[in-house]
């Protein structure tokens, strides 16, 4: 009996300006395999990509870091939790690994981190995989807009943010919008909550929540980068996402008309129940981008 190749994966830390960045890296069977940087979302970490890495990591070099304040990354006291700072650390991480060209997978928080990286170092970006990673105001649901409008001085704002850091809310982000919640393993949201409950982690998330409005202010700059660079782009979007809605997926086609758009009947964490459909799309996309072939647009 023949089984599909399962990737070997390395797990280690690397120092980036005093931050001990934890990351997972697959060991592909080819030294010249295409490279993809996987940028995770809230409230997760690199473990959200473990099944994708197992599935594709034998053919591609997949690298997934944990941001400061997330997962196994260890952050020194006094670290200022802002999206600019997360992007600084990821940029330093890429430099430490010596990466010079890669496809970038952006999901949720990965979009504001990744697009900052792209506008700073456009020569690094060979292509984009966008999975519920918003860069357009029309992609913000009313609930997302209300949340982004919160400011530290608003009465009850801190409590509103902290309500999102509880186990029921974390579980709801995984199972909400899925056609069959039984396909969502409990491991992801259970591990996320473990990290959220570590000392100092909730304070880090509150600080990032109050900084999120800065990302919306950056949307026009990221859109200009997309129009200028028109990178090969694959969009895989869960249309039942309560935060980032389907119009946000379609908005990318204004700036990257050749983007390959696929919509799925699922929620925010689309890989949890749609990996069998999304992984082959990513594999074909990586092969085309690395070979320099055009990406055919679909919707």
Image: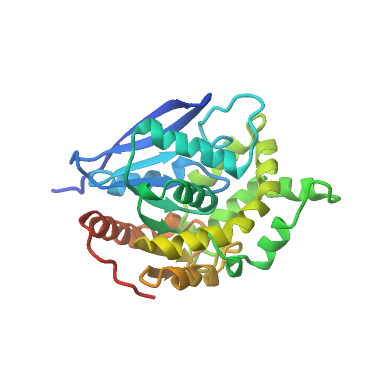
| Residue 22 placement, left or right of 170 | left
Give the camera-side residue of 93 and 33: 93
**Position above or below: 230 against 198:** below
Q: Is residue 146 left or right of residue 292?
A: right
Q: Residue at x 47, y 38 (%)?
A: 90
Quarter of the image with the C terminus is bottom left
Q: Quadrant of residue 74?
A: top right
Spot the residue most to the left.
1
User: How far from the left and from the top, in percent, is residue 226?
Assistant: 45, 62
In the foreground, 97 or 267:
97
Residue at 57% across / 60% down in the picture?
219
Measured as percent of width and height from the top left, residue 88 is found at 52, 38
Residue 250 in the image: above or below residue 70: below
**Relative to 9, is 273 on the left or the right?**
right
Return the x and y of residue 45 as percentages of the image width and height: 50, 41
Q: Nearer the viewer, residue 297 or 156?
A: 297
């Amino acid at each position: 009996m023949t089984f599909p190749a399962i990737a070997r994966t390395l797990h280690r830390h690397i120092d980036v300006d005093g931050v001990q960045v934890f990351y997972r890296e697959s060991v592909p069977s080819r030294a010249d395999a295409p490279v993809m940087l996987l940028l995770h979302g809230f409230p997760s970490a690199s473990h959200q990509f473990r099944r994708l890495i197992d599935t594709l990591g034998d053919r591609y070099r997949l690298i997934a870091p944990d941001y400061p304040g997330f997962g196994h990354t260890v952050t020194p006291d006094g670290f200022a939790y802002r999206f600019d700072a997360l992007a600084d650390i990821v940029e330093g991480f890429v430099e430490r690994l010596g990466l010079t060209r890669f496809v970038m997978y952006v999901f949720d928080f990965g979009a504001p981190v990744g697009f900052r990286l792209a506008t700073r170092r456009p020569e690094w970006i060979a292509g984009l995989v966008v999975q519920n990673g918003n860069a357009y105001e029309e992609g913000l649901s009313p609930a997302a807009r209300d949340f982004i409008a919160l400011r530290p001085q608003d009465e009850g704002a801190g409590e509103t943010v902290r309500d999102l850091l509880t186990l029921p809310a974390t579980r709801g982000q995984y199972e909400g919008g899925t056609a069959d919640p039984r396909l969502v393993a409990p491991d992801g949201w259970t591990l996320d909550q473990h990290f959220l409950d570590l000392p100092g982690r909730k304070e880090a998330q509150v600080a990032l929540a109050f900084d999120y409005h800065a990302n919306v202010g950056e949307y026009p700059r990221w859109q200009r980068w997309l129009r200028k660079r028109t990178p090969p782009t694959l969009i895989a979007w869960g249309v039942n996402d309560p935060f980032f809605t389907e119009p946000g997926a379609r908005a990318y086609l204004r700036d990257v008309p050749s983007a390959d758009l696929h919509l799925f009947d699922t929620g925010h964490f689309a890989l949890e129940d749609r990996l069998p459909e999304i992984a082959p799309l990513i594999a074909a996309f990586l092969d085309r981008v690395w070979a320099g072939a055009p990406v055919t647009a679909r919707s």
